[in-house]
Amino acid sequence: MRPTVLLFDIDGTLVTTGGAGRRSMEAAFEKLHGRRDACDSFAMSGMTDRAIVRQAMRIIGVEDTTEAIDAVIHAYVTHLAEEVHKVDDARYRVFPGMREAVKEARSLPGFAVGLGTGNVREGARVKLERVRIYDQFDFGGFGCDNEDRTELIRCGARAGAARLGAPLEECRVVVIGDTPKDVHAARGIGAECIGVGTGTFAAQALLDAGATVAFQDFSHPEALTALLGKR
């Protein structure tokens, strides 16, 4: 079997945070720019954190300099570290089958299990430590690596290949995500994409966007088989 790099998205794929991320972003904009509604007019699903901040700044008429974006991101992560602990376990949870899939992949030789997420690295840590799963991911491509999702996925794929000691072009790369943006990013680097209907989009919508396969969630009996390349 080819060396395999797995890149898991976070929000809507691995976990639901019960809205903690959105509320933290709203709080950051309210603190720095007096506008809690900065993100109300667009869908954040599948966007990188920095792209969300940039678009919101343009909407409210704030210059989107690197320094200004950094300030919002810092405030966001600070709020997030508190907000995740305000959400009860019924609303903040890992989606069905995900813990088991990650554990199984990590147990196999020739697999590198990482993250491919629009979250900045510190935000990813905060969100996943809340459900005690962050330490299951050894590397990743993050929203702080690149604002463009395709490029951050490429960063994650390279990091995974390096861990396996294999050239990237010899690796099987699989992105696991819940939005068409995940699908397009995967396809943009020639990777497979396993779609999950646990976020905003149904499994069929992800297939229509070009996912290799898609399932309602990872409790489906064929999901793990697809992940491990045994189809």
Image (tube, rainbow, N blue to C red):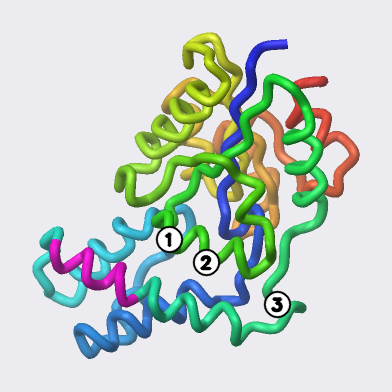
Q: Secondary structure at mark 3?
A: loop
Outermost residue to the right:
221
Is the stretch drawn in magenta largely helix, strand or loop? helix
User: Residue beneath label 2, please?
Assistant: 126
Q: Position of residue 86 (x, y in %)?
A: 60, 87
Vertical side of 188 occupied by 47: above or below: below
Gap between marks 2 and 3 measured at Cα? 16 Å
Q: Position of residue 175 (x, y in %)?
A: 58, 35
- Identify which amino acid the numbered label 2 is placed on: Val
Q: Closer to the observer: label 2 or label 3?
A: 2
Q: Secondary structure at mark 1?
A: helix
> Mark 1, residues whose alpha carbon is within 10 Å: few (<14), some, or many (≥20)?
some
Q: Does the stretch in magenta take in 43?
A: no
Q: Position of residue 111 (x, y in %)?
A: 67, 26
Q: Earlier in the sequence, mark 2 or mark 3?
A: 3
Q: Is residue 153 left or right of residue 179?
A: left
Q: Position of residue 64 (x, y in %)?
A: 14, 64
Q: Are marks 3 and 1 in contact (CB under 8 Å)?
A: no
User: Residue beneath label 1, please?
Assistant: 122
Magenta stretch: give its range: 67-75
Determine the residue positioned at 70% across, 83% down.
Answer: 88
User: Residue beneath label 3, please?
Assistant: 91
Q: Nearer the viewer, residue 189 or 112?
A: 112
Q: Are marks 2 and 1 in contact (CB under 8 Å)?
A: yes
Say the numbered circle drawn on residue 1: none
Q: Nearer the viewer, residue 179 or 71?
A: 71
